[in-house]
Image (cartoon, rainbow, N blue to C red):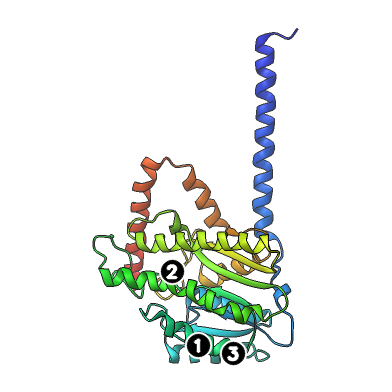
Amino acid sequence: MPSIPSMIGNFSYYIGLITLLYFSIQFLQFVYLHVRPTSIRIYHYGPAPWALITGASDGIGLALARQLASHDFNIVLHGRNPSKLERVRSGLIEHFPNIAVRIAVADAASPDWSSAVNNVLKAVQDLHLTVLINNVGGTGALLKPPIKTFEDTTNDEIENLINLNLRFPTQLTRCLLPVISKVRGPKLIMNIGSLAASGAPLASVYGGCKAFNHAWSKGWQAELQSTRQKVEVLTMIVGGVTETAHRKTASTIFTPDAGTMARAAVQKVGCGRAEVVGYWSHGVQSCLLRLVPDAVLGRLKVEIMKRVRLEEGKSQ
């Protein structure tokens, strides 16, 4: 009969082996997630497939429009500034002469969400719409400064944040369902999320809106799967990104530019998950933050957000 120390040694060996195998599988899955080929082309079918990108005047939205145009999708650009949208439209047509581009002007932060949604519906109701990307959101255009405490945020600013980041994308998606349902084939709905959904000091309302978006997307995707509908609802979780409307700092390994982030987001299409961290270094950040005790994590996040606020202030 083996001795007790020998049994303990064998037990520890097998526990270590299983642990090593588990983390090896996790690592390989992580690598594959970020190198696998995109499945975006399965949504390119029919006589004229269209993609609607909200908040497409600049930043990630504009970069996503360029990515989809490079895959030969016709593009509907949404934004609130018509002259800016016209410039983006002209640029897309110049670089991608074989596609068509429409614009939809609507203020997503407006309290009159119904009118804003109807403006977008008018631009797409006759289209073969196979892709919807709910990208519009953020704080920069609504808050001065864009990162500040909940106490310093006014009631009107809170309403605008909720309209922009929560109410408009949810109501727009619901109102677009009849248009999307007319298309007989697979459809993609990508909702741009945020690492802030786990709780972001100095951006607590914004983070709360993104937490709603994550929960809504995952719940709806489960509904669709249960009825075997060919709709991929994908939450794309994003961390810090530069080359946006309100952040012009140089890109780093943990803060990619908007173009890099958009390529990573499109690459994740068809990955089989309802929610995914889009860029590899943001995934590393997310994993590392989960290892930090809650008592320390809150203070750490405050310091990170203060540094972001300082960097954004310098780039303005």
Amino acid type assigned to the residue bearing label 3 in the image: Val
**Horizontal and vertical percent for residue 188?**
64, 72
Which mark sits nearer the N-terminus, 1 or 2? 1
How far separated are the C-alphas under marks 1 and 3? Answer: 10 Å
Front disc: 3 or 2: 2
Amino acid type assigned to the residue bearing label 1 in the image: Ala
Front disc: 1 or 3: 1
What residue is pinned by disc 3? 101
Q: Point out the image quarter for the C terminus.
A: bottom left
How far separated are the C-alphas under marks 1 and 2? Answer: 19 Å
Amino acid type assigned to the residue bearing label 2 in the image: Leu
The answer to whether residue 279 of the structure is visible from this angle is no
Q: Which mark is residue 104?
A: 1
**Horizontal and vertical percent for residue 2?**
73, 9
Which mark sits nearer the N-terminus, 3 or 2? 3
How far separated are the C-alphas under marks 3 and 2? Answer: 26 Å
Furthest residue in direction front, as rendered: 227
Q: Are marks 3 and 2 in contact (CB under 8 Å)?
A: no
Which element is circle 1 on?
Answer: strand
Left/right placement of residue 107 relative to residue 35 reads: left
Foreground residue among 215 and 66: 215
Left/right placement of residue 180 relative to residue 205 reads: right
**Horizontal and vertical percent for residue 307?**
34, 58
Q: Which mark is residue 166?
A: 2
- What's the residue at 43%, 72% (across, down)? 167
Which element is circle 3 on?
Answer: strand
Front disc: 1 or 2: 2
